Amino acid sequence: MPEIQLLRRLRFVTLSAAPLVLFGCGSEPTAPSPPIGEVIGDPIPELTAAERAAASRGRPLFDAVFEAQDGLGPLFNGSSCATCHIQPVSGGTSDRIIRMATRELSDGTCDDLSLLGGPVYQNLRTLPLQRAVGGGMERIPAAATHRTERVAPDLFGLGLLDAIPESTILALADPTDSDGDGISGRPNRAPDGRLGRFGRKAVVPTLAEFNTAAFFIELGITSAAHPDEVGIAGQPLPAGTDPAPDPELSAIEIARVDTFIRFLAPPFRAPGGAAADRGEQLFSSVGCDGCHVPTLRTGSSATAALANREVAAYTDLLLHDMGPGLVDVCQGLASPTEFRTEPLMGLRLNQLFMHDGRATTIAQAVDLHGGEAAASRAAYRGLPESDRNALLEFLGTL
């Protein structure tokens, strides 16, 4: 439907994490707003006025709550992008859990179970689908060899990660551990061979594809890139359960949400004292920076604010084996124990850590690292308590 008609039908959620201030007689005036880029959820400060305006046009659709008549579902995990990306502001994370399952074949290749409704199995159904077949979560098929839960990552700074040159990522790869440091990061690839960089397994090549797929997988909303609805276990939907005509979002609407996400600034680093400064040095000395590379540099871009700049990403965007304690699903070339190095920009904003939220503190997350990170974990554990605390204080500033 035309965008203006869609926006009139959609309901909106209140997303600001700031307290509501009421004014009366004698109330004190509010402090002036901080400059662009100094508030979590702001756009990149170097954007032009036109680019900031373009980013702002995408937020209403990101925040909008969809219903069945707008295209929601019939299978879905959330009724808006902000359902899973709301803490502390739009574009952040949440404690919402999604479920995934895949099948690892005997030759080591990965079946994403797409013919059986996978790899994401939705938790919710719209009312029309419930009336037709009943409620409940979509069942994971018996064919699955691996299953997992996932928490939503924040989306801050992803436009900058999208602008990292492929050559930079590949230069960091060492699949045979030729330098003998115990770290053998390798790239993941999409089915067509393109380099992956987004998602917990780095299976999605571009931010635009990542965002469009999220509308389809998490909200059940079709677009030109994903025009066909998927029913329970990959079967056709019962008649009358999908009232909105496909595609349910236009290319313009998808592009606006993509622009909003693409231009979200990375969170600024919080102030830290001398202990945090010492912790930053310890982060390197125990080897954490072997995978969590502190800075990457973007390449050329049509957007000047994204071009040729340092990004404090703390990732190499490569796959690393994290050991049997973190076994997960396979995806693309990634085995069940391999994960993309998680970017640490905005780490302090999270309440749950690791891919499935099993850790509730940064210290717990560090302690869960295994596989290629086992040596760094051992070095961290061997530090005096004051040094361990300093390293954690540094991480708490990111």
Image: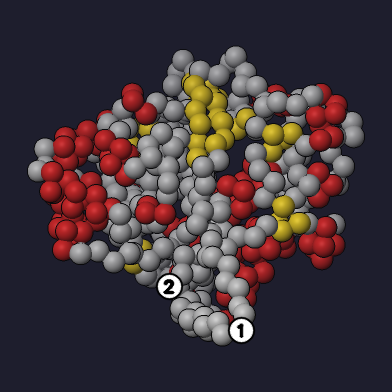
Nearer to us in this view, 266 or 159: 266
Label 1, residues with CA under 10 Å away: few <14, some 14-19, many ≥20: few
Residue at point 76%, 44% (across, down): 72
The part of the image, by quadrant, that contains residue 376 is top left
Q: Quadrant of the N terminus?
A: bottom right
Among numbered discs 2 and 1, the one appearing first in the sequence: 1
Image location of residue 333, percent across then percent down: 44, 33
Q: How many marks?
A: 2
Residue 336 visible, this orientation: yes
Q: Amino acid at mark 2?
A: Glu
Q: CA distance from mark 2 to mark 1?
A: 31 Å
Residue 25 is labelled as: 1
Image location of residue 397, percent across then percent down: 30, 59
Residue 184 lies, with reference to residue 134, above or below; the image says below
Residue at point 76%, 56% (across, down): 11
Label 2, residues with CA under 10 Å away: few <14, some 14-19, many ≥20: some
In the rendered image, which residue does mark 2 sit on?
Answer: 38
Residue at point 85%, 26% (across, down): 132
Mark 2 or 1: the one toward you:
1
Residue at point 57%, 63% (across, down): 16
Image location of residue 45, percent across then percent down: 46, 75
Most distant residue in the right direction: 240
Residue 133 lies, with reference to residue 350, above or below; the image says above
The part of the image, by quadrant, that contains residue 119 is top right
- Secondary element under disc 1, as helix, strand or loop, is loop
Nearer to us in this view, 21 or 293: 21
Q: Are marks 2 and 1 in contact (CB under 8 Å)?
A: no
Q: Amino acid at mark 1?
A: Cys
- Secondary element under disc 2, as helix, strand or loop, is loop
Residue 289 visible, this orientation: no
